[in-house]
């Protein structure tokens, strides 16, 4: 039996509740302002209601943000860094970027920060923020991007020349847990410039404001305590979190204020508190001594370090956030209270006696505090946690990998884990408004998400990108779960499970999409992810969590029924669904009323449902191994799949099929009010998604489930009308396996001929979302004198459809490429090595489908790897990333990638689904060098 690494031992302790190792983690958002949750406007203008400029002065209602910060799992107490270079107009407390209304390609962060390392229990974490010496060009970025149109590139921070001559600081933030409640913090600052430069560093501790919204909420408190021994210390008390202490190396200045809104600055209304959220900012930047509390207590506090750092010099600050007190009672105020005698119990004081008693114990040597100091064993603990992180990731990928590839995978996993966020949103409370706040506008009764009155989130969730998308997105989350399952299957399972719980899922069975519109429709990939996570845990960790599988499956049957009842307008097993996550891929906005009237029968919507059926079938067959009741349910999904597949390939004698025999491709079909039907001949992913609906069944499974086998055989013999045009288990494949698929041999070849054509879909870095054919042959549709068109656009979108910040008209997207790779592997699993196709089309080179899948996988991986010129395609023509030794090994995982050159586009920290590259790298290491695909045991899914 494999010996568990220390990180796995911690994960096991968390699972059995021996120690709450995940209690503290990187749960701060990178952006809380400009979110739906903080929007109390009448008409849902979230970007304008709560701006970046307001964020330093205005208390958040639902969450907190910060730079490389941490919090507890209910975000009661938060820690992050703030910086000031002596030039900026404000403290750098949070990341700056453009809103959806300000950017010429929608919202976008305009900072450089990197997630370098993290472990599932957050026992070790490392991030890097690059902070310029000069004043941050806020105005230049705003005005220049506002001036540019959608066909021009965005102005990025690096384009302003602010990093030229290395005039910046590298600020590394690291965390190492000594225990679940004892966290060591190290801030390492390197001056990369040629001249000495001063820097203010303010490690900041604060409470999320929970007391301003209701009248009976107890207010927590932070205050200075006398620690001696060359230390500075802040004690924290929270009614439910209890006592914590922040120990700061050196006798540094401690600043205190309140995490409460500066109404005077924002609304010209007198402040309720003498000290407000931006008090520390005003003290440091404006020199306003009266802005912080001289009595040194509050709900927001910072240690103030003023450093002068020579050229090339490194300076380090050490801190420790712990539940262990170092202060003897004699130094902690009256009768053990941490409130100084002058403050304890005074009328109007924020420090009542009932919150005292913080002092009393000290660090024994065994707790990492030799000699009573919180820093005596500091370096040793950090070294241990770093070594254990290395051991854990070597266990995850024990296969031979090059240093560069291993670096990419490690940073991909780090990004996945840093993108965890505390997500708090209670729709009922949000709609009604708070008792202590003015009543919301009447129009908010019908505001977005008002039909989701039941929704209640108080969870740690995986975000697509904590700045650009600091909210969960259901179909993104399904893809996140795949690489997460490799390193932390319990967290991955929770992500999938919670979306189906009654406080998330709508009573009608719909899964919430994302906070801008919970009622939008995403592709139904939840069952696929559930099945994959189950199999990944089974393979890597040897555990089969049937309780998880069954629990989610039961709820997904409700969701499946919702799809059938809501998205099949004519009851013919041909589905609509709207944009289905593919934003602008169609000639029309598929989520809006069509300018032609009528509706669109969607090739992708119908194919997703075919895939959904097969995913549910696979789960039902697994559950039927121990519970025969599920045989009947498996039969139901088998039969439903046949109806969907038949409708996909042949709607009826007088109706257009989604399959175009002349073109050898699937298209959407426009169904006009007069019953005329028009194929919308855009060569896009819409026509490739039918490949996703594929599943193999092992002969052993059929033998074990005689009821299911009998029903299948009856259907094959008695319903030839449903089985003649699809792969429907008639013929045995390799290993006597049976195949269910919408697409079979002949159509598979014809589709792959286009997909693997480098003048169409196949790019150097993966499969494009739209064929390159449309670069010179745009698809044009006229409606009442208005032209609608689709062109091949390999980079940013030229339209504002869906905010204009994503583009499905040419770039490469990881999630669909990942599903294509998996589908090809499944087809190969059935068809074997004898079935070969030309790859690339026209090259004369024949490949098995396994080899084609491997080729696509390697093209995707190569986006991030240095090529023969030492350049990473992901960074395109940005020279600093390509040649500067302080930049070239830092990896950003973008939302999507240029269809021709692989450059990263869109959200720069969408390690969410782009983190799938970590899984692809793992498979590359496992199978590279084999002449043939792996031979798997009965009913074991290929681990993509």
Image (spheres, rainbow, N blue to C red):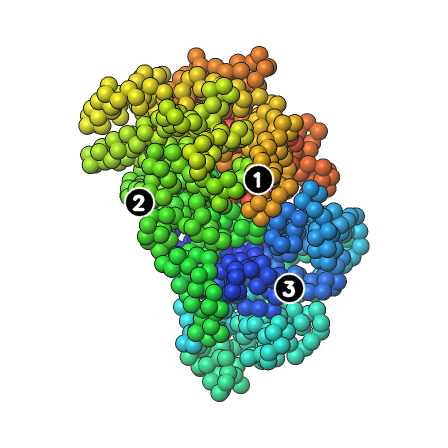
Would residue 604 be visible to someone looking at this image? no
Q: What residue does disc 2 label? A: 558
Q: Residue at x 61, y 66 (%)?
A: 54
Earlier in the chain: of badge 2 and badge 1, it is 2
Picture coordinates of residue 194, whole percent (x, y): 80, 51
Secondary structure beneath dot 1 equals loop
Residue depth check, mark 3 versus mark 2: number of the one nearer the observer: 2
Identify the image quadrant of residue 791.
top right
Q: What residue does disc 1 label? A: 784
Earlier in the chain: of badge 3 and badge 2, it is 3
- Report crowding for label 1: few under 14, some 14 to 19, many 20 or more residues within 10 A (C-alpha): few
Is residue 530 found left or right of 818 in the rendered image? left
Alpha carbon distance from label 3 to label 2: 44 Å
Q: What residue does disc 3 label? A: 53
Secondary structure beneath dot 2 equals helix
Residue 445 versus residue 832: which sits nearer the camera?
445
């Amino acid at each position: 039996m494999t010996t568990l690494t220390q990180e796995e031992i911690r994960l096991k302790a968390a699972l059995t509740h021996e120690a709450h190792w995940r209690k503290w983690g990187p749960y701060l958002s990178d952006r809380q302002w400009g979110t739906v949750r903080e929007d109390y406007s009448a008409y849902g203008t979230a970007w304008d209601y709560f701006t970046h400029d307001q964020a330093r002065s205005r208390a958040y209602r639902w969450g907190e943000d910060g730079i490389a910060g941490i919090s507890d799992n209910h975000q009661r107490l938060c820690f992050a860094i703030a910086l000031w270079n002596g030039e900026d107009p404000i403290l750098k407390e949070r990341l700056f970027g453009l809103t959806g209304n300000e950017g010429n390609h929608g919202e976008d962060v305009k900072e450089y920060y990197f997630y370098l390392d993290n472990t599932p229990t957050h026992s070790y974490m490392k991030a890097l923020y690059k902070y310029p010496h000069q004043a941050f060009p806020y105005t230049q970025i705003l005005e220049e991007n506002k001036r540019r149109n959608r066909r021009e590139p965005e102005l990025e921070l690096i384009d302003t020349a602010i990093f030229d001559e290395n005039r910046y600081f590298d600020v590394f933030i690291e965390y190492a847990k000594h225990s679940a409640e004892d966290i060591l913090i190290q801030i390492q600052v390197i001056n990369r410039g040629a001249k000495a430069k001063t820097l203010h560093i303010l490690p900041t501790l604060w409470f999320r404001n929970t007391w301003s919204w209701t009248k009976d909420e107890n207010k927590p408190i932070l205050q200075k305590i006398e620690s001696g021994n060359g230390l500075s210390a802040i004690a924290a008390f929270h009614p439910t979190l209890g006592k914590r202490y922040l120990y700061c190396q050196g006798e540094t200045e401690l600043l205190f204020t309140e995490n409460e809104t500066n109404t005077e600055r924002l609304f010209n209304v007198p402040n309720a508190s003498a000290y407000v959220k931006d008090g520390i900012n005003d003290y440091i930047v404006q020199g306003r001594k009266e802005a912080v509390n001289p009595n040194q207590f509050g709900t927001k506090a910072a240690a103030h370090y003023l450093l002068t750092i020579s050229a090339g010099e490194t300076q380090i600050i050490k801190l420790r956030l712990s539940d262990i007190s170092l202060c003897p009672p004699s130094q902690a105020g009256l009768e053990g209270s941490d409130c100084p005698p002058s403050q304890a119990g005074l009328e109007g004081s924020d420090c009542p006696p009932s919150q005292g008693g913080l002092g009393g114990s000290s660090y024994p040597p065994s707790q990492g505090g030799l000699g009573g100091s919180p820093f005596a064993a500091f370096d040793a603990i950090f070294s241990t946690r770093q070594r254990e992180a290395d051991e854990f990731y070597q266990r995850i990928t024990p296969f031979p990998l090059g240093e560069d590839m291993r670096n990419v995978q490690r940073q991909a996993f780090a990004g996945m884990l840093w993108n965890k966020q505390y997500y708090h949103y209670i729709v009922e409370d949000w709609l009604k408004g708070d008792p202590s706040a003015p009543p919301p506008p009447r129009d908010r009764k019908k505001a977005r998400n008002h039909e989701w009155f039941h929704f209640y989130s108080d969870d740690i969730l995986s975000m697509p990108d904590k700045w650009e998308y600091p909210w969960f997105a259901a179909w993104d989350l399904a893809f996140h779960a795949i690489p997460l399952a490799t390193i932390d299957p319990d967290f991955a399972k929770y992500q999938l499970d919670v979306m189906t719980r009654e406080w998330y899922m709508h009573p009608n069975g719909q899964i919430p999409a994302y906070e801008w519109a919970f009622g939008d429709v995403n592709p139904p990939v939840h069952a696929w992810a559930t099945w994959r996570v189950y199999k990944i845990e089974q393979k890597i960790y040897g555990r089969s969590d049937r309780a998880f599988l069954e629990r989610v499956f039961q709820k997904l049957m409700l969701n499946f029924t919702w799809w059938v009842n809501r998205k099949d307008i004519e009851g013919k097993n041909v589905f609509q669904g709207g944009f289905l996550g593919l934003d602008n891929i169609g000639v029309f906005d598929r989520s809006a009323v069509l300018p032609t009237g009528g509706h669109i029968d969607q090739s992708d919507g119908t194919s997703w449902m075919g895939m959904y059926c097969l995913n549910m079938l696979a789960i039902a067959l697994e559950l039927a191994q121990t519970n025969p009741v599920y045989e009947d349910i498996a039969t139901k999904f088998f039969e439903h799949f046949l109806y969907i597949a038949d409708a996909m390939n042949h709607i009826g004698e007088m109706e257009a099929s989604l399959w175009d025999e002349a073109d050898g491709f699937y298209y959407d079909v426009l169904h006009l009010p007069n019953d005329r039907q028009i194929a919308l001949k855009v060569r896009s992913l819409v026509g490739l998604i039918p490949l996703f609906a594929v599943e193999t069944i092992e002969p052993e499974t059929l033998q074990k489930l005689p009821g299911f086998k009998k029903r299948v055989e009856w259907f094959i013999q008695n319903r030839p009308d449903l089985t003649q045009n699809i792969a429907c288990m008639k013929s045995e494949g390799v290993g006597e396996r049976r195949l269910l698929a919408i697409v079979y041999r002949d159509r598979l070849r014809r589709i792959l001929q286009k997909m693997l054509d480098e003048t169409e879909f196949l790019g150097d870095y993966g499969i494009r979302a739209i064929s390159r054919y449309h670069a010179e042959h745009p698809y044009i549709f006229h409606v009442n004198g208005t032209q609608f068109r689709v062109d091949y656009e390999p980079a940013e979108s030229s339209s504002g459809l869906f905010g204009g910040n994503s583009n499905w008209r040419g770039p490469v997207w990881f999630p669909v490429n990942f599903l294509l790779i998996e589908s090809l592997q499944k087809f190969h699993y059935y068809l074997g090595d004898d079935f070969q196709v030309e790859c690339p089309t026209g090259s004369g080179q024949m490949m098995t489908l396994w080899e084609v899948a491997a080729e696509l996988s390697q093209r995707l991986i190569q986006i991030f790897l240095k090529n023969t010129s030492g350049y990473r395609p992901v960074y395109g023509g940005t020279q600093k990333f390509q040649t500067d030794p302080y930049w070239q090994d830092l990896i950003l995982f973008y939302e999507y990638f240029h269809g021709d050159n692989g450059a990263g586009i869109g959200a720069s920290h969408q390690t969410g689904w782009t983190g799938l590259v970590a899984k692809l790298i793992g498979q590359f290491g496992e199978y590279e060098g084999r002449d043939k695909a792996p031979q798997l045991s009965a009913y074991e899914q290929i681990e993509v």
